[in-house]
Image: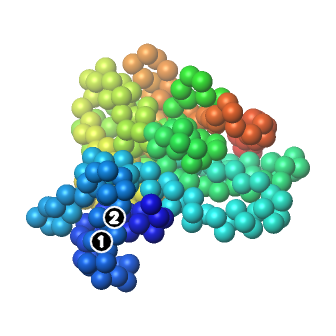
């Protein structure tokens, strides 16, 4: 098996057609087909199946695609590793969750540097579920999770962020300093999809139902298209952290939400640093410095 064959396969899956992938790879279609057939023979099973519109991955193909993505990502970062080796710096690959405060992370990086650790950070953006998978596979070294890490994983609690609602400039809620769940009654509210900020998928619905509040939830993955997604969904507000609102809902006003879940605990987003027990000892110190930076951020 060769790396180029994995690259050809990934490009074909992402293109959806062999002809389209061949054009992107500057190959002829028969040459690409031969390479894909050789890869299937090497792996002992079909990776692609024909569809009316082109090709789609088989169950084996899906598994190989996920594995190949990780391999190719590591290959792409090889020049970065070479530069770091020459400078004698170590690379720490960190998972960045939705809504991570940029100011806090920059403060955390400065804290690590001030502590004398010669470390270079590389960020991988992903939900808590995605990061947990990347941590287990060894594709990242330090995960920043919005969910309590699984047993057997070292972790350090970092900080808590209050939830709030980003509302449109034209919204009558714009004059409010604080919102309650009752303010969301009969509104269409966009919230993070499951796996991004897990507290919202379960706790928001149960809290609203417990108070007899009928809210029309639209669960989506937040991105730089969030305002467009909200427009298409007819969302009146977006429930998220202040840091996420600044990044994804430019021009919307973020208002804190004074609400509790069904058990009486405030609705908020917690973040933990997590790393494997067998990882480099410096990760524990980095996590501690991250927590210190979070405490200083809260005081600022």
- Find disc 2 in the rendering and name its residue: 38
Quadrant where the N terminus sits is: bottom left
The residue closer to the viewer here, 31 or 149, is 31
Percent x, y for residue 134?
Answer: 52, 44
Relative to 194, does residue 139 appear above or below in the rendering?
A: below
Instruction: Say whether residue 96 is left or right of residue 58.
Output: right
The residue closer to the viewer here, 114 or 225, is 114
Percent x, y for residue 257?
Answer: 46, 36
| Number of other residues with Cα within 10 Å of mark 2, as a class: few under 14, some 14 to 19, many 20 or more | some
| Residue drawn at x 70%, y 37% as measured from the top left | 279
Residue 35 visible in the displayed image: yes
The residue closer to the viewer here, 15 or 173, is 15
Q: Count the marks.
A: 2
The numbered disc on residue 34 is 1
Give the spatial CA distance, label 1 vs label 2: 6 Å
Q: Identify the secondary structure beneath mark 1.
A: helix
Q: Identify the secondary structure beneath mark 2.
A: helix
| Residue drawn at x 50%, y 25% as measured from the top left | 266
The numbered disc on residue 142 is none
| Number of other residues with Cα within 10 Å of mark 1, as a class: few under 14, some 14 to 19, many 20 or more | few
Contact (CB < 8 A) between labels 1 and 2?
yes
| Residue drawn at x 36%, y 34% as measured from the top left | 201
Instruction: Report the coloring of the rendering.
Output: rainbow
Q: Quadrant of residue 211?
A: top left
Percent x, y for residue 163?
Answer: 49, 38
Residue closest to the far left: 52
Relative to 241, does residue 272 appear above or below in the rendering?
A: above
Percent x, y for residue 39?
Answer: 35, 61
Residue 255 visible in the displayed image: no
Instruction: Say whether residue 278 is left or right of residue 181.
Output: right
């Amino acid at each position: 098996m060769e790396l180029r064959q994995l690259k050809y396969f990934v490009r074909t899956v992402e293109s959806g057609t062999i002809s389209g992938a061949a054009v992107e790879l500057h190959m002829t279609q028969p040459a690409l087909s031969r390479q894909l057939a050789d890869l299937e023979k090497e792996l002992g099973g079909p990776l692609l199946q024909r569809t009316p519109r082109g090709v789609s991955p088989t169950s084996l193909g899906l598994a190989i695609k996920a594995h190949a993505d990780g391999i190719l990502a590591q290959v792409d970062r090889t020049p970065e590793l070479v530069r770091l080796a020459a400078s004698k710096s170590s690379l720490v690959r960190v998972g960045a969750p939705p809504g991570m405060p940029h100011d806090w992370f920059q403060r955390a990086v400065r804290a690590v540097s001030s502590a004398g650790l010669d470390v270079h950070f590389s960020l991988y953006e992903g939900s808590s579920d995605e990061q947990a998978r990347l941590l287990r596979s060894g594709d990242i070294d330090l995960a920043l999770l919005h969910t309590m890490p699984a047993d057997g994983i070292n972790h350090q609690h970092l900080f808590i962020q209050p939830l709030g609602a980003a509302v449109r400039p034209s919204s009558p809620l714009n004059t409010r300093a604080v919102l309650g769940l009752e303010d969301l009654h009969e509104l269409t509210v966009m919230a993070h999809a499951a796996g991004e900020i897990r507290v919202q998928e379960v706790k928001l619905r149960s809290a609203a139902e417990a108070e007899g509040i009928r809210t029309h939830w639209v669960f989506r993955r937040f991105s730089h298209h969030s305002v467009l997604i909200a427009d298409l969904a007819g969302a009146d507000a977006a429930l998220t952290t202040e840091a996420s609102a600044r990044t994804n809902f430019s021009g919307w006003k973020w208002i804190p939400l004074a609400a509790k879940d069904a058990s009486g605990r405030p609705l908020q987003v917690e973040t933990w640093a997590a790393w494997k027990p067998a990882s480099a000892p410096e990760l524990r110190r980095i996590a501690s410095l991250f927590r210190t930076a979070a405490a200083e951020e809260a005081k600022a």
